[in-house]
Amino acid sequence: MNAPLNLENLTIAVIGAGGKMGMRVSNNLQKTAHTVYYAENGAAGQERVLATGRTLTDTAIAVVDADVVVLAVPDIALGAVSAAVVPELKTGAILLTLDPAAAYANLLFQRDDIEYAVAHPCHPSVFLERHTPEEYADTFGGIAAPQDVVAAIESGDADKQIVAETVIRVIYAPVIDVHWVTVKQLAYLEPTLVETVACMIGSLLNEALKETIETVGVPAAAARAMLLGHTQVALANTLKGDNPFSDACLIAMDYGREMIIKENWKDIFNDQQLDLVIARMLHLDAVKH
């Protein structure tokens, strides 16, 4: 029987340590007492890691004794990277990915004697009460503004979940709470809820702003001020129930739905459409279950 891990000093390997997410999680891990190894194959990424004063380690050496291996690489690379990394892991190690798409699509190299976990940040809420300039500036999270995280662990092993959560709370710090779901549920959150819907709506808002300025001729400052303020009100009214919309606004909202939204838009919340969007994201012909 293996001795329990010291949660204050885990051995952690970050693969892809010089990428965007790799740098973010490494910056937070560097502040801890954990033993951390940083691996990066790309020349530009290696320069970024070395510029922070961190030491680079070859991937094979970094992962061999790791309790938790963080794959901070793009989704489309996770299949190949996991095939190279997973065979080198010790029994009982945790492979932590930062997005559910590859796990949902069964692209990760499999071993029965290791644990698979995935965790994705929620990013600081639009309703977060902020107090410092650093918190206001941290829109992505992981620096100063608190955020929640949603995570999944393949086996549901409670002990492994505790170890994974220890690392998750560090790499995405400051963390308010970690919400545990299934891999499939996490895939419905990201991409369906937040990318297919929320990010698309954000892009649509930006397009509407440009049309208001360039086609209608409204001064940019006036249009931007009106949109940003009303976006805050719209979110507060719909998601928090702060105030009711006026009768005239409700009529305009119905008109907007008629003009912009397809009647069958809720089909994105069925499994066939989830498979379709993830296959597109990962450049696959189809998701194989």
Image: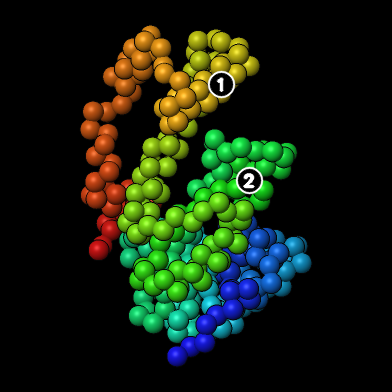
Q: Can residue 205 be seen in this view?
A: no
Q: Is residue 122 left or right of residue 253?
A: right
> Is 76 left, or right, of 67 in this rendering?
left
Tell me the quadrant of the picture where the N terminus can be found: bottom left
Q: Earlier in the sequence, mark 1 or mark 2?
A: 2
Relative to 94, residue 178 above or below: above
Asked which secondary structure carries label 2, the reply is loop
Please indicate whether residue 62 sits to the left or right of residue 49 in the image.
left
On-image quarter of the C terminus? bottom left
Q: Which residue is tagged 1? A: 229
- Check disc 1 and give the amino acid type: Gly
Which residue lies at the image location 37% right of the left edge and 79% below the top edge?
A: 111
Q: Where residue 177 appears, x then y in whole percent?
A: 51, 53
Q: Is residue 148 visible?
A: yes
Residue type pointed to by label 2: Ala
Q: Which residue is drawn at 65% across and 38% down?
A: 130
Q: In this view, does 218 lie to the left or right of 83?
A: right
Q: Name the residue under label 2.
A: 145
Image quadrant of residue 252? top left
The circle on residue 51 is none
- Image location (x, y in percent) of residue 149: 50, 53
